[in-house]
Image (cartoon, coloured by chain):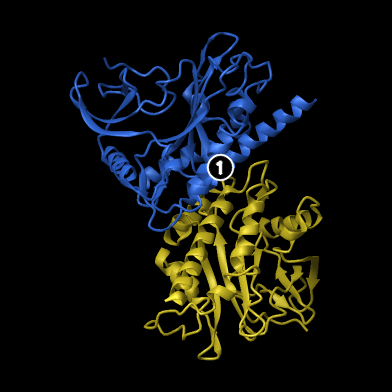
Chain colours: A blue, B yellow
Amino acid sequence: MLKVPEHQVAGHIAKDGKPGPLVDDKGRFFKPLQGDSRGEIEVKFYESFSSNTEVPDHIRRYFPVYHGTQAVEGSDGAAMIVLENLLSKYSKPSVMDVKMGSRTWYPEASEEYIQKCLRKDARSTTVSSGFRISGFEVYDHKELSFWKPDRKLLNGIKVDGARLALRKFVSSNTLSDTSSKPDSAFASSVYGGSRGVLTQLLELKTWFENQTFYHFNSCSILIIYENESIHEDGARAQVKLVDFAHVHDGNGVIDHNFLGGLCSFINFVRDILQSSDESTDN
Amino acid sequence: MLKVPEHQVAGHIAKDGKPGPLVDDKGRFFKPLQGDSRGEIEVKFYESFSSNTEVPDHIRRYFPVYHGTQAVEGSDGAAMIVLENLLSKYSKPSVMDVKMGSRTWYPEASEEYIQKCLRKDARSTTVSSGFRISGFEVYDHKELSFWKPDRKLLNGIKVDGARLALRKFVSSNTLSDTSSKPDSAFASSVYGGSRGVLTQLLELKTWFENQTFYHFNSCSILIIYENESIHEDGARAQVKLVDFAHVHDGNGVIDHNFLGGLCSFINFVRDILQSSDESTDN
């Protein structure tokens, strides 16, 4: 009944005998509890967040629904966090994972962890742009198949590479072909409009300008849209926050690290929308 | 004709034979060119900024007016940047210097410089709060004199210390007396109102959400207000950006590091305004 998810673009997978995430046919996603304090912190966050009455409903919908924890048979009885499967209602989803913030470490971490994060942050676009694209999978409308660039390749991309990836993510022409320019055919239906990605990001931004409950260190924004019915029913674009293994108490200070990166990411998305408007006009 | 400025709260001073900043009686401020690339970068910034027609006038007023560079006699002919003296029209100014951003280093810097900045950033409120108070001088209405805490003391303050300093900065009771709670008597006239600090910070924020010309690494916001006539003419509060020795080209990316810190600082100021409203109501 449980199976390996089809469209996971980032995060931990089954390796070296450790279980990976699983999904069932009832729209639930099972995420293995990470052994050290990370699993504990993530459960603590979900427990706190799901019972925090000061989080408004229009913000709550940007987070996966939490169904508690459960020992899962067939995975050696490993403890798992049970969440909403964000992709269960999509048949041909394009998915992107964007790790937010201009740093992924936090002051309380060990010196070794900080230095490891710093190196990764400087090599990627984290320091320069306030976010990094840590994984994506796009449905290729020409090849009728999914295209998923290598994760290591993604880690090394610079600002121009991030811009290009954000264009490819909403393009209809062949993606593995590096000679053709991405056409950004779906930019306005995915990024734009009253239910598009930009509108959702701006709503999140307003909350982040005020909320001082949580600091979302090393947390990702997941962007999802549907390709099968994109021409008829629209893109059904969704923005979701995921990965809370390093969330800390805000102690009355806003999460300026996440917020700064979010504002930068908003500008990247807005740039693509504006330039695709211009190309439509010509 | 040139003399040492009376109310400098942060930045370099005359030391070891090197000249410090000077002021004249015509409202000009002479800032020694720092010997290495920093002086060069600061001049380059002022030249670029003062000729950048895409900077709107309502934003330009948050920067000191630039009058070019000049060799100054009496300081061994040292080259100096000539700026508007921001304090020349104030007789009893309170001044605060707030270094912005959750990091003061930048990727292109040397490994040694980065590690030095990181240590300072982690010790201060830079990493935790996205800014640090690097100097302030307040006019004490009880003692009829200026009170200026030691700079080293300021470097070690944590989040609660920063909150307290921002309250003391707008209080009328004796400041050196640690037993009395700051009364925040001037909070609404300095931080609040249509010409107060908060309004000015919000205007800057809007610009920083869009501008991709400059990354203001290690730059400060200076807050100034007048004490002499505060009960009659108001506080004449001013917000200014200063110190551009580490400004870099934005390369099409917003300054998410400055912006995140600015949003956090705005929240600190707003908190004080809201709690001083409450105490007035009681």
Q: Position of residue B152 (x, y in %)?
A: 46, 72
Q: Residue visible at 42% across and 61% down?
A: B123
| Rendered view: B164 above or below A69 | below
The residue at which mark 1 appears reads as: A202
Q: Position of residue A228 (x, y in %)?
A: 53, 14
Q: Amino acid at mark 1?
A: Leu
Residue A262 or B96: which is nearer the viewer?
Answer: A262
Q: Is disc 1 placed on a helix, strand or loop?
A: helix
Q: In the rendered view, does B37 fall on the left or right side of B185?
A: right
Q: Is residue B265 visible?
A: yes
Q: In the rendered view, does A260 fall on the left or right side of B89?
A: left
Q: Position of residue A32 (x, y in %)?
A: 28, 29
Residue A246 or A48: which is nearer the viewer?
Answer: A48
**Position of the N terminus of chain B by quadrant:** bottom right
Q: Residue visible at 25% across and 21% down?
A: A17
**Position of the C terminus of chain B by quadrant:** bottom left
Q: Residue visible at 69% across and 63% down?
A: B62
Check the image and name the residue furthest to the bottom: B143
Q: Is residue B152 visible?
A: no
Quadrant assignment, res A87: top left
Q: Position of residue B172 (x, y in %)?
A: 51, 83
| Rendered view: B257 above or below B225 | above
Quadrant assignment, res B278: bottom left
| Rendered view: A71 above or below B191 | above
Q: Chain of mark 1?
A: A
